Amino acid sequence: MTHPASAPVPLSGPRFHTEPLELYRRIRREHGAVAPVLLDGDVPAWLVLGYRELHQVTSDPVLFSRDSDLWNQWDAIPADWPLLPMIGRKQPSILYTVGERHRERAGVVSGALEAVDPFVLRQLAERYADELIDALCGKGACDLIAEYAMLLPVRVLAALYGFADEQGPGLVTAMNDMINGGAGALDGQRHLAESMGALLAAKAARPGDDVASRMLGNTAGFTVEEVAQDLMVMMAAGHQPTADWIGNSLRLMLTDDRFAASLSGGRHSVGEAMNEVLWEDTPTQNVAGRWASRDTHLGGRRIEQGDLLLLGLAAANADPHVRADAGAFTGGNNAHLSFGHGEHRCPFPAQEVAETIARTGIEVLLDRLPDVDLAVPEDSLTRRPSPWLRGLTALPVTYTPTPALGGLS
């Protein structure tokens, strides 16, 4: 089936963060499983909305390459294009490495994360979650995004990397400054890069039982700069989506009666809420991207060599061709594409780390603040204006003030 020529959809506007699933359904009805879209500056691309089509793209890294040098639009991209940090050229990180070199590099990352002791990971997550709640529990009200979800993942990841405990708060600030953009973004990026360089120098001289030392000790011949780039990518990719996973799951549990029991001290529904979020409200909505290495066809569309394809993870998860009811609760079904698919997907050990941090963060919060309640009407909650990552700008809550634990657990 081919689709007639149709006007491209601007990948911007409030509907991407107010009602994205309804918007994706409309785009699918009007354009099919692969839709023409426009990025900032009217740069053309394809958005892959179909589950099967996205599976096809991510399963064929030769035809649909991760090599951004293939892009046929580079001559039209200005030096100050706002999406360059996301869709860059000749970037040295694992994100843009292809072929055997990518497989080797991904193996080093996966091996370093897989060696993390799950009990140590859980203890670290509990420790920092308790520390954060100690600062909140006596107030009786807080914003769970700014004061909790956006602070927890980096602290845990920094400890796993091998950073000293006292460096954690500075790394949290740097990472969030980078995410928020503006005047502090470059300073945040500089602090993170300098801190990573100092960490690797220290671990090269005195290795430890940590992710940085394990990556430095690999035998695949990667440079210190490559290791530093991959560690920074892993921290960025692990922090914001995990923070949004925490925030989106807590929003669901605070606003949906099905999860009311969990808010009174039970834990049995936490995993269900987290899984439903990955289907219905996934933190990573769209991913850039893949580039066609030759002319081809996909979802009834003619894709030309060098065309950019965006992975519509949220849209694919709601594809009615693979889900009888795209709005239904999916229970224990883990066939979502929220972590991607294929050899460039989020490494499985990284998924496990993110899930442990998010689940522990939610469980500790519910244990410590069992009567937490939303402080504003549900329909007043707002999302960041982004088609890429879906997360709340704030989640204000109230609860009965309680004493701090008096120290780290």
Image: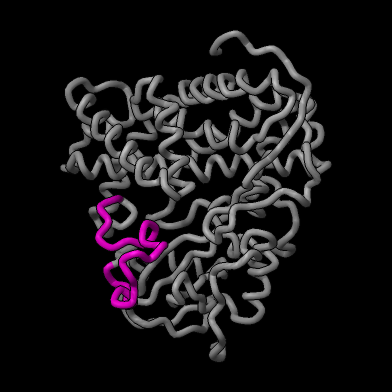
Q: Quadrant of the N terminus?
A: bottom right
Viewer-closest of 96 and 341: 96
Q: Residue at image x 63%, y 11%?
A: 405
Viewer-closest of 386 and 231: 386
Q: Residue at image x 18%, y 37%?
A: 219
Residue 37 location (% of width, % of height): 51, 76
Residue 225, placed above or below residue 323 = above
Q: How is the image coloured?
A: one colour
Residue 362 lies in what quarter of the image?
Answer: top right
Residue 150 lies in what quarter of the image?
Answer: top right
Asked if residue 54 lies in the magenta stretch, the reply is no
Q: How many marks?
A: 0
Residue 100, placed above or below residue 398 = below
Q: Residue at image x 25%, y 40%?
A: 227
Q: Residue at image x 37%, y 82%?
A: 304
Residue 341, placed above or below residue 117 = below
Residue 218 as seen in the image, left or right of residue 312: left
Asked if residue 89 lies in the magenta stretch, the reply is yes
Q: Quadrant of the C terminus?
A: top right
Specify the farthest residue to the front: 183
Residue 19 as seen in the image, left or right of residue 209: right
Whether residue 114 is visible here, answered yes or no, is yes
Viewer-closest of 158 and 297: 158
Residue 401 location (% of width, % of height): 75, 19
Magenta residue span: 69-93
Residue 378 location (% of width, % of height): 78, 47
Q: Main secondary structure of the magenta part?
A: loop
Residue 76 location (% of width, % of height): 33, 77
